[in-house]
Image (cartoon, rainbow, N blue to C red):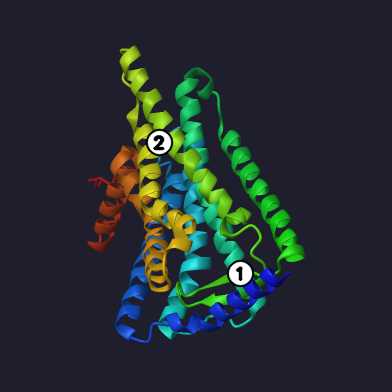
Amino acid sequence: MIRETMHNISLQNSMMDNTFYRIEDPVPRYLWAAYFVFLFALSIIWDGTILIGSCCYKAIKLHTCLVVIVEYMAILSLAISLIVTLPRIISLVANEPLVRDMKICLYLSLARYFLGAIGTLSLCLMTGFKLLILKFPLRAVTWTKKWAIVSIVALILCSVVALVIAVPGIYEKDKLYPYFDFRTYQCNYYKSTCSGGVLGDVLILIPVISFVLLVFSTLLLLLIARRITQRTNENLKWQGVLTTISISVIFCITGGPFLFYFVKMPYFDKDQRCIYLRVTESAIYIHPMGNNFVYVIAIASFRQFLWSTARKMCLVSRGTSEWDSTGTVVK
């Protein structure tokens, strides 16, 4: 009891001193805000292009299940940009909390952890589907987009159930205290007791476990693809394999250091912890943008769609109004 009381006092004092991390110098703060503005603009443009190109023009020619997952990940990226990135930009520019209501702050904080967990699990789902497609190619031909939709819905429902179970349990035992974290200029929360630690929270455990599964499944995918090319004389369609592996590798590079922070956090001092958190947590948002560039490089049909669309826009700007489906002027 005494230990818990002392821990509560320590946490409350650390939260009261949170304004110490406020960035008073406008130059680094505006540069940091400009970084997120750049990522936000890219997300709106690229994710919107992916959704329009895939849904309306069938521009992504992969297996049907993979296409559905790509579209879902684009929607998820847009949600993160609107719910997480945009409020952060406003807070950085104003150098003040965007949300004053602590209940809303708590919901935003939980939503951020939830979207992050869902995003990592989505990568595992994509890698898992590609493994099954390589392992059972004849059966995979008959798989429709319903398989992917059902899997995505099941993934979301399981995550929602985990969130609903975790939060009331925390409220009964620990109670959550929301606050605005000037280290990252986002809403956050802390527990009233030290039971479970940071890794005891299910919203942190899900990304950590899924990160390990993602690394394992990516290595397994690469191994199976290599064995298929060695055992058969047929050319393996590396387009889907390279897309899946590249997306997983980008996430491991950008997200790995951030997850490492939660494991080694007690070993950092106060200043090192703040700097490391800001750098690694900001780097995580490069991953969705990296996915879009992977689509351009690895998927020929999407690259052709972008080229065709760019040519059409040039023709419109020049006053030409007639072209065929490939973007060639009809004479």
Task: Give how far across and how far down residue 287 sits, in percent.
Answer: 39, 53
- At 35% from the left and 52% from the top, the residue drawn is 290
Residue closer to the observer: 22 or 299: 22
Mark 2 Cα-neighbour bin, 10 Å: few <14, some 14–19, many ≥20: some
- Indicate whether 319 appears above or below 18: above
**Mark 2: secondary structure:** loop
Determine whether the residue tagged by mark 1 lies in a helix, strand or loop. strand
Q: Position of residue 7 (x, y in %)?
A: 63, 72
Residue at the far front: name it.
Answer: 2
In the rendered structure, the answer to whether residue 3 lies left or right of residue 10 reads right
Residue type at mark 1? Tyr
Q: Amino acid at mark 2?
A: Lys
Q: Is residue 223 above or below residue 41?
A: above
Q: Is residue 172 visible?
A: yes
Above or below residue 146? Residue 34 is: below
Q: Which mark is residue 97?
A: none
- Residue 61's mark? 2
Q: Residue at x 41, y 48 (%)?
A: 53
The quadrant in which residue 304 appears is top left
Q: Are marks 1 and 2 in contact (CB under 8 Å)?
A: no
Can you see residue 48? no
Q: Residue at x 45, y 74 (%)?
A: 183
- Nearer-the-camera pick, 216 or 227: 216
* Residue located beneath label 1 in the image: 190
User: How far separated are the C-alphas under marks 1 and 2?
Assistant: 45 Å
